[in-house]
Image: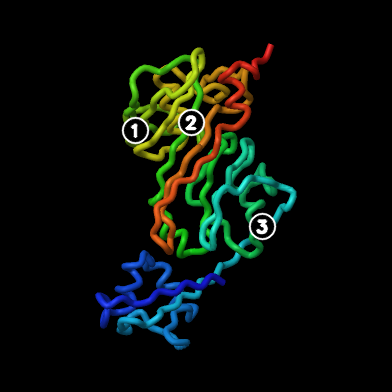
């Protein structure tokens, strides 16, 4: 059970509790859950969302963690690069799915989360493909999930053979034929914009990438579209001789902490397999 308390400032004296709490980033969905559970209190007594609050009063939220049906797997590991009472940020290794599926029942980040935080539902705020490494932000309660949703800025790092021209790809993305997984640039797709710049490398280029949109496989599709697929990306035509997965890493996330409102930036270094192909130490013969 997560407990959060707020002291009502003078400028909110006499307003409804829901007005004050919404000013603190509490979503309507969380308020509804608090009403159902009786988790909104003042001075030890139940507080209704329509009740007036007054300056100096302490309003307390008791957030139920919820339930989970995901099997715990304590044998899995992923580095934790940030953690507080509301948020945990994992550095997900490559080849680990985020969610269980028909082919992956107990080897996912969700299974690891279930082992580390028994009983808490798995609430990832950003998601990564199985073979993509990097930072995955997870909320520990419904309040944090609502506060974090839409607030995360991400920076990706990718490696291509050669340096792509320009710095932006603006091309719509949609499904490739009847494929459930594969995507392509297509006129009737959804708008997609990718920004990139080279930050290192000679024969191979290390790109720093940011997105205006979040389409499935967006970076991979856009780089392939301009003739520079990611190294190791067998789905979109990348050279797989030096690395066994797409060379893509979520290396930086920026978000606002749910309670304090502080904006923080978390980073994770380039993984060994990607660093190796930049300097040629991981070449295959």
Image position, residue 90 (x, y; %): 58, 47
Q: Which mark is residue 147?
A: none
Residue tagged 1: 193
In the rendered image, which quarter contains the N terminus?
Answer: bottom right
Q: Which one is earlier in the sequence, the residue at label 3 or at label 1?
A: 3
Q: Which one is earlier in the sequence, the residue at label 1 or at label 2?
A: 2
In the rendered image, which quarter contains the C terminus?
Answer: top right
Frontmost of labels 3 and 1 is 3
Judging from the image, what secondary structure is the residue with disc 1 in?
strand
> Whole-Å distance between the Cαs marked 3 and 1?
37 Å
* Few, some or many residues within 10 Å of mark 2 (<14, 14–19, 20+): many
Using the image, determine if residue 79 lies above or below residue 251: below
Q: Image check: 89 left or right of 102? A: left
Asked if the residues shown at circle 1 and circle 2 are in contact, with their CB atoms under 8 angstroms apart, the answer is no
Image position, residue 106 (x, y; %): 69, 49
> Whole-Å distance between the Cαs marked 3 and 2?
28 Å
Residue tagged 3: 116
Judging from the image, what secondary structure is the residue with disc 3 in?
helix
Task: Please report the residue visible at 66 percent of the width from the left and 57 percent of the height from the top.
Answer: 116
Using the image, determine if residue 128 lies above or below residue 173: below
Judging from the image, what secondary structure is the residue with disc 2 in?
strand
Image position, residue 98 (x, y; %): 58, 45
Task: Please report the residue visible at 52 percent of the width from the left and 63 percent of the height from the top.
Answer: 141
Q: Image check: 12 left or right of 73? A: left
Residue tagged 2: 157
- The residue lying toward the viewer, choosing from 104 and 188, is 104
Task: Please report the residue visible at 26 percent of the width from the left and 83 percent of the height from the top.
Answer: 14
Frontmost of labels 1 and 2 is 2
Using the image, determine if residue 122 lies above or below residue 194: below
Using the image, determine if residue 109 lies above or below residue 186: below
């Amino acid at each position: 059970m997560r407990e959060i308390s707020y002291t009502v400032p003078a400028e909110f004296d006499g307003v409804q509790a829901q007005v004050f709490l919404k000013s603190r980033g509490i979503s309507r969905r969380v308020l509804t859950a608090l009403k159902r559970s009786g988790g909104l209190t003042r001075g030890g007594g139940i507080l209704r969302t329509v009740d007036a609050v007054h300056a100096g009063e302490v309003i307390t939220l008791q957030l139920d963690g919820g339930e989970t049906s995901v099997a715990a797997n304590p044998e899995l590991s992923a580095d934790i690069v940030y953690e507080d009472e509301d948020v945990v940020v994992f550095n997900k290794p490559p080849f680990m799915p985020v969610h269980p599926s028909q082919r992956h029942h107990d080897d996912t980040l969700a299974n690891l989360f279930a082992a580390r935080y028994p009983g808490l539902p798995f609430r990832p705020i950003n998601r990564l493909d199985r073979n993509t490494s990097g930072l995955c932000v997870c909320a520990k309660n419904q309040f944090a999930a609502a506060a974090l949703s839409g607030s995360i800025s991400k920076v990706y790092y990718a490696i291509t053979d050669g340096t792509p021209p320009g710095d932006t790809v603006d091309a719509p993305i949609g499904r490739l034929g009847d494929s459930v997984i594969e995507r392509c640039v297509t006129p009737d797709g959804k708008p997609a914009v990718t920004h990139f710049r080279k930050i290192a490398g000679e024969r191979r280029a290390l790109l720093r990438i940011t997105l205006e949109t979040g389409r499935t496989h967006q970076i991979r599709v856009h780089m392939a579209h301009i003739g520079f697929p990611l190294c190791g990306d067998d789905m979109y035509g990348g050279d797989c001789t030096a690395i066994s997965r797409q060379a893509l890493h979520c290396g930086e996330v920026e978000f606002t902490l749910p309670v304090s409102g502080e904006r923080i930036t978390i980073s994770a270094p380039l993984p060994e397999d990607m660093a190796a192909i930049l300097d040629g130490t991981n070449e295959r013969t």
